[in-house]
Image (cartoon, rainbow, N blue to C red):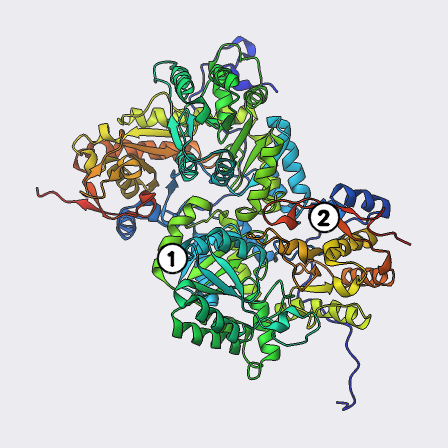
Amino acid sequence: MTDRRQQPGASRAAGIELPRANAVIEPFRIKAVEPIPLLSPGERATRIEQAHYNLFRLDADHVTFDLLTDSGTGAMSANQWAGIMAGDESYAGARSFRRFERVVQDLTGKPHVIPTHQGRSAEALLMKALVRPGELVPGNTHFDTTRANIESAGAAALDLPAEVDADPLFPGNLDLDALKQTLEKNATRIPLVILTITNNSAGGLPVSAANVRKTKALLNPHGIPLFIDAARFAENAYFIKHREPGYSDRTVEQIAREIFALADGVLMSAKKDAFGNIGGFLALGDDSLAEAIRTQMVITEGFPTYGGLAGRDLEALAIGLREILEESYLAYRIRSVEYFGEGIEQAGYPVLRPFGGHAVYIDAGKALPHLGAGQFPGQALAVAFYQSIGMRTVEIGSVMFGRRNRETGEEIPAPHELLRLAMPRRVYTQSHVDYMVEMLAHLRPHLNSLPGYRFTYQAEVLRHFTAKFQPIVTPV
Amino acid sequence: MSTTEEPPRRSWAEPFKIKMVEPIRATSFEERHSALRDAGYNTFLLRSEEVYIDLLTDSGTNAMSDRQWAGMMLGDEAYAGSRNFYHLERAVQQHYGFPYVVPTHQGRGAEHLISKVLIHPGDVIPGNMYFTTTRLHQELAGGTFADVIIDEAHDATSEHPFKGNVDLGKLDALVQRVGAERIPYVSVAATVNMAGGQPISLENLRKVRAYCQEHGIRIILDATRAVENAWFIRQREPGRGEQSIATILRELCACADGCTMSGKKDLMVNIGGFLAVNDPEVFEEARNLVVIYEGLHTYGGLAGRDMEAMARGIREAVQEDHIRARIGQVEYVGEKLRRAGIPIVLPVGGHAIYIDARRFLPHLSQDQFPAQALAAALYLEAGVRAMERGIVSAGRDPVSGEHYYPRLELIRLTFPRRVYTQAHCDVAAEAICALYARRERIRGLKMVYEPKYLRFFQARFEPLGDSVYESA
């Protein structure tokens, strides 16, 4: 298909050259709407206090702009909703599964397609089948549930992200030298390598096709399989098309196929780049691995032709996996995240650059220099954004990745104090974004008066989900 | 009114009308023959479009109501704090009575959680007959299942009204033998699927409750079909005839410390389940685990819309008209088969009719997989898909590696809720009668592929003769 967005500012009618528009055009119109809650500042103050200053504890009904995650929060298309109505709910051999299977086979080139209810269960099944205690699983940067599933199989998750300035266009890459060294020492202890595209934990930043190819070439002599975590594969393919030499003439779909062809297997949370509200899958080339996983999955997931999903969800995902490859959509998607990031930066906040595909990250440590890591500046900023604007964001800093020393009770901080503003797909308009940016600019001069926070309750694992906080009130 | 005996009524009517339909297709014998061969003579491996009337399971195969579909459109897909979760939580609290609710993507997700939280290696978990996934989760958590159901449950010919009852003598003997401290809970199913959808009485459950309280043992209810169980209590248990189904359901749950639930049955949804408990500490632990296996505790691996549909399903499930028609349909087919002399498990259960393959095919020994062969032959005869519930489902003893040889060798004809009409039921019943007339033509099978876990799902077979069944 032709992509009008390929030529920025490309209206050449009657010889008139217009500059590239700043506005973001959605390549769709709205078919169903959902009211958003509008609360007064007083109500929000009460709600956040009742939620113990943890945004995970807020009811969605009390959030105006929900930027907590782009996972499962996207808007489905009219076609997907039609698929929902056509779901075949037969327990075994449903036609919705066959349709889903065909789409995934066609896209990934892998014969074995195993549906799962979420991405994390695809990870759990894969690690259980492939990973043994004492082994090592390298990756560009493992997502937190991937890491948890590797560790739960008794192995170590090894992050080998490339230096940010090694390739400024593809900061999500894997560090090939580091992988080479790891292979020299530990090849026999490595059951697989995972490339997460885009690299979520590193800010949703892309991985180049060359990086995937070279990773595969390093693994080949050792016979180690390469897996792709494809949650945001289409966003990554779009970045390749527009940034990597030699790819501008190819379609995003061709690029995605090329990436998948380099891999031995694909795992995906379909709640991102398949426009699903629920779902995931594994796509595998290896017959015996597929058989082992199908045997295992009935225990926790479901029968292999539904994998814990309703038939209608398989139907919606089959449609979503085709829609995501529309280049006009991807142009809108990437540009709208960038537009939001530019606005936040202009409003005076330190943001991470370059912008990734699905979220904008604010450096909360820099934005609130008066708070040390022990006072959780990311949390402070998250609470302030909710209180003053009704936005729900997520702290990615010492609350999520810091640790408490069990003996001393001392907090061990994370390396960065970030706040993530994730954009659900096809949900918020440019007006929503403009409003948020405007309000963020109004808030900017008051940042130095924001209080820090301390824990009043924390669980042993994954504490950020259920933690409780209190503001630290300093005497004036 | 006349005092003479009224003739049995043939007609009953569904308390709903049809709002949306799904086409089904009849197939030829030749098509079915090749489809069955490709499926390794395992009905689980057939494609749904190869099936005319699908009685494989009542799990997730139900028709939702227009109100449930409307709820689907009101899904709040927020990652945390979705309003649909709160609707679900409220409906569970109100009708099942447990204060703490953890949603899961399926019933087996809830079983996984409770087994991990409560069972320690070496523990013994008594129950009123095993269920495939329940027992497997108990075993994977290091426990051993012990059957304490009354003997009548294992007798396909007994007409005991509550074949799901626990034998308190067996339970006590077990407690004496292993000690109460090694029994984390008694696993009570209502109704008992593997016994033929048979109910437990409230009286029996109360006695189990009193016994367990005395010994400090928890009760975890498998509430998957507890609404159907409540219906049987009202029909069969003295003094319950005037109570509402909702009241009896609450009383059942009041005897337990928690429940696991597959919402795909009683609650008429296509996906979903939950764990609900009384103990805040068990809840806390389950809530910390759910995020690893299922999803954050306010969605548990479900889309918001599916939680909404389940919340609405709870309120529909306890409607008297609904449950009467539901069980009435199964009874109708059961009565038809009984009159025709087909050997079925009696009394007829709530969600399914179980045909006794031992009596149907006395010429086959159990290691020729008579129930598997009967399910295959029924598909060939009429395109009706049933499920084996006999030696294949029972699996192998993890210690000795031998087949378990269950006394019950059954096929299950399971009725999805609100899906098939009386005419579909008649077609299925007539096919079974036709097959019964030619039953000596059905041959045994041999297993040619056997998966390690829950083998019945994916095992493959070959006929011992030229074909499993020669049609006329």
Let me know if residue B81 appears in the view. no
Q: Which residue is mark 2?
A: B42
Compared across the picture, whether B217 is left or right of B227 comes to left
Q: Residue at x 42, y 26 (%)?
A: A138
Q: Which residue is mark 1?
A: B283
> Looking at the rendered structure, which numbered label has been put on residue A131?
none
- Image quarter where the N terminus of chain A lies is top right
Q: Nearer the viewer, residue B65 or B124?
A: B124
Vertical relation: B400 (above or below) A269 = below
Query: Mark 2 falls within which chain?
Result: B
Q: Amino acid at mark 1?
A: Phe
**Counting other residues with Cα less than 10 Å from the Cα at mark 2, is it few (<14), some (14-19), or many (20 or more)?**
many
Label 1 – label 2 distance at C-alpha: 39 Å
Q: Position of residue A315 (x, y in %)?
A: 62, 40
Q: Position of residue A371 (x, y in %)?
A: 18, 34
Q: Amino acid at mark 2?
A: Asn
Query: Mark 1 falls within which chain?
Result: B
